Image (cartoon, helix red, strand yellow):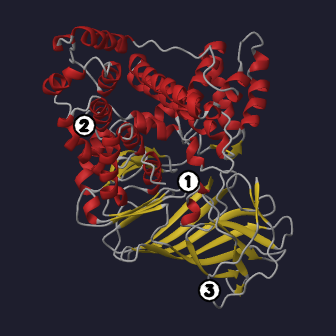
């Protein structure tokens, strides 16, 4: 925690300001006084203005001032506050605190002991970090603009004045007005068709944290994939997307059989334009997904299994702070692998798991030299951007910790525990200590002979010695091919019959960059890798090309970096370019041309890699 001296910001020349500002302190990346005031519900009434790149209207917050405090303190960043009304009729005094890196500004509102409702009238900034305003050229259809939000981790405050902390759960509703050419969607009960009025109402009856607030507005259409699921996409992407996600209803059924009933009603997927910075975002009722998973062979749908799994781990049971991020992601990766095993078999799931474990070991090696503390599951992100915690540690080390427990107690006992855990903490937030207490009481006590070294896994750096090893027979076959080629340089050693994306990734990751320097052209000619349209394969191939200075691929690398916005793919390519003066110069040239097409999450990461921050 750190303390800020409050200062007044110029918001309006007419509104009443607070004469004696309270001392403002940030706790868990939030200024909000949620220990004193309970936020129960938010109603948004917003108009979407593509011409000026802003949302404008009001947020009505229903609160319980259980402590009798004089102030409601909310999180804001890049918001323009016009006025604040109590019970939507009495003007309230308000002031903004000093701008703080990462956190924005506290909005301090004078309230009464019996205040039940606070209405904040505001509009967003064109630079609001959660809002990605796309020109028609940045979409698949090239004819209409597009808007989508990305609220995680602490960007909800850039488009909604709120208590922007995962510890705070609330219900919400919204009235959204937009041009009749567009269909708006939210992380709520959605509409499936456009209407002639351009006015849409949304309800989210289950309580969610602020990072799951989501809005998208674009030229969108819907195709049903089952009784309670379907896909939204631009018309140009709809058929391909529906083909890719044909097993969506089976995924929902399989997940529900494993760990309890799906609690959110519908589960739909929105395929976004390429600038979306993540693979997917688990917004309840509607996952936002990158188009990079549309591979044409359904080989990348594990990402959808991951976002679906978040409907239990993350959305249903939420990490209370970003230091506890592994509780969201570790459980989700584990659950994702179980869904894939149930639908496609253990050999397929083992491939996914072994690939992830390999990536984890690389991450651990890197962090042990640069930031060893970040290899702990329980993080310390005080004073830092919580996005710093988005690494393979939370995701894959967290998953491997849970796999280790499963190995110790057996799958039946472990499944019983996980199902009970989700049910016990549903619609609540939990800390790492809460998990440990529940684990000790409900699993360890029943299996005293099990070697569950949870303290080492959670609080120590690196990977414990009892980290599970995954042995995929399919990947062993690929590893043998790679070893043969590394040693003998004969293209016939590589038999790609039956290859999926995961086979290709393992092959590329096991080719020795130093030993195949003179074989790059042979590999490219044989398998047409530079011209691949599979974003996963492109990423790993282009990293090899950069390591070997294979100039033939550089125009394709530039095209790739210009048309993919997913941080997972941008980061390793820019990382490797930045290792040489020539590569760094090339990377900077590309970034300067295309940075405005990246979401702020990706843009900030790449700017750091290129030493532009």
The answer to which quarter of the image holds residue 136 is: bottom left
Side of 96 relative to 53 (left or right): right
Along the polypeptide, which appears first: circle 2 or circle 3?
Answer: 3
Q: In this rendered view, identify the residue nearer to me: 210 or 29.
A: 29
Element type where label 3 sits in the image: loop
Residue plotted at (54% across, 41% down): 390
- Where does the image place residue 432, in percent across and percent down from the top left? 72, 36
Crowd band around label 2 with a 10 angstrom C-alpha radius: few (<14), some (14–19), many (20+): few
Judge whether 184 appears above or below 352 on screen: below
**Mark 3 burial class by Cα count in 10 Å: few <14, some 14-19, many 20+:** few
The vertical placement of 486 against 504, above or below, is above
Q: Which mark is residue 366?
A: none
Residue of label 2: 296
Tell us which disc is closer to us: 2 or 3.
Answer: 3
Q: CA distance from mark 3 to mark 1?
A: 30 Å
- Label 2, secondary structure: give it: loop
In x, y percent, where is residue 122? 57, 77
Residue 12 marker: 3
């Amino acid at each position: 925690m750190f303390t800020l001296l409050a200062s007044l910001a110029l918001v309006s020349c007419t509104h009443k300001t607070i004469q004696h500002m309270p001392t403002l302190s940030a706790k868990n990346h939030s200024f909000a006084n949620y220990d004193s005031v309970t936020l129960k519900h938010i109603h948004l009434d917003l108009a979407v203005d593509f011409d000026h790149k802003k949302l404008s209207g009001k947020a009505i917050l229903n609160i319980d001032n259980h402590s009798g405090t004089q102030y409601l303190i909310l999180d804001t960043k890049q918001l323009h506050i016009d006025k604040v009304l109590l019970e939507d009729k009495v003007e309230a005094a308000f002031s903004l605190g000093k701008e703080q890196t990462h956190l924005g500004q506290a909005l301090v509102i004078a309230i009464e002991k019996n205040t039940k409702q606070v209405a904040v009238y505001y509009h967003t900034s064109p630079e609001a970090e959660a809002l990605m305003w796309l020109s028609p050229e940045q979409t698949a259809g090239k004819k209409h603009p597009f808007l989508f939000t990305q609220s995680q981790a602490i960007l909800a405050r850039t488009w909604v004045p709120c208590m922007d902390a995962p510890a705070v759960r609330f219900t919400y509703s919204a009235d959204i007005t937009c041009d009749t050419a567009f269909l708006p969607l939210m992380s709520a009960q959605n509409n499936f068709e456009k209407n002639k009025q351009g006015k849409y109402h949304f309800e989210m009856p289950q309580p969610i944290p602020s990072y799951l607030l989501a809005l998208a507005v674009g030229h969108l259409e819907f195709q049903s994939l089952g009784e309670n699921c379907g896909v939204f996409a631009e018309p140009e992407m709809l058929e391909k997307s529906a083909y890719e996600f044909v097993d969506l209803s089976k995924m929902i059924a399989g997940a529900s059989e494993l760990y309890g009933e799906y609690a959110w009603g519908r589960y739909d997927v929105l395929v976004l334009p390429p600038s979306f910075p993540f693979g997917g975002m688990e917004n309840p009722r509607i996952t936002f997904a990158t188009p990079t998973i549309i591979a044409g062979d359904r080989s990348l749908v594990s990402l959808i299994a991951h976002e679906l799994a978040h409907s239990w781990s993350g959305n249903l049971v939420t990490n209370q702070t970003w230091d506890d991020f592994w509780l969201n992601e570790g459980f989700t990766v584990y659950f994702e692998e179980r869904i894939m095993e149930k639908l496609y078999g253990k050999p397929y799931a083992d491939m996914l798991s072994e690939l992830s474990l390999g990536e984890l070991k690389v991450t651990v090696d890197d962090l042990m030299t640069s930031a060893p503390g970040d290899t702990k599951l329980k993080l310390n992100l005080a004073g830092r951007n919580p996005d710093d915690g988005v690494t393979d540690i939370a995701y894959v080390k967290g998953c491997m910790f849970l796999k280790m427990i499963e190995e110790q107690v057996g799958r039946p006992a472990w499944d019983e525990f996980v199902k009970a855990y989700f049910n016990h903490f549903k619609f609540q937030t939990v800390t790492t200590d809460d998990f440990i207490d529940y684990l000790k009481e409900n699993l360890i006590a029943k299996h005293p002979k099990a070697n569950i070294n949870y303290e080492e896994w959670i609080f120590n750096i690196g990977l414990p010695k009892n980290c599970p090893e995954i042995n995929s027979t399919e990947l062993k076959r690929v590893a043998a091919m790679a070893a043969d080629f590394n040693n003998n340089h004969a293209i016939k050693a590589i038999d790609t019959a039956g290859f999926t994306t995961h086979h290709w990734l393992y092959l590329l990751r096991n080719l020795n960059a130093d030993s195949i320097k003179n074989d790059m052209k042979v590999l490219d000619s044989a398998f047409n890798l530079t011209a691949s349209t599979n974003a996963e394969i492109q990423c790993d191939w282009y990293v090899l090309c950069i390591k070997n200075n294979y100039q033939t691929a550089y125009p394709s690398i530039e095209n790739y970096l210009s048309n993919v916005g997913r941080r997972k793919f941008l980061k390793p390519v820019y990382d490797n370019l930045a290792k040489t003066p020539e590569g760094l110069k090339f990377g900077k040239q590309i970034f300067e041309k295309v940075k405005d097409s990246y979401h702020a999450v990706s843009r900030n990461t790449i700017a750091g890699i290129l030493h532009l921050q």
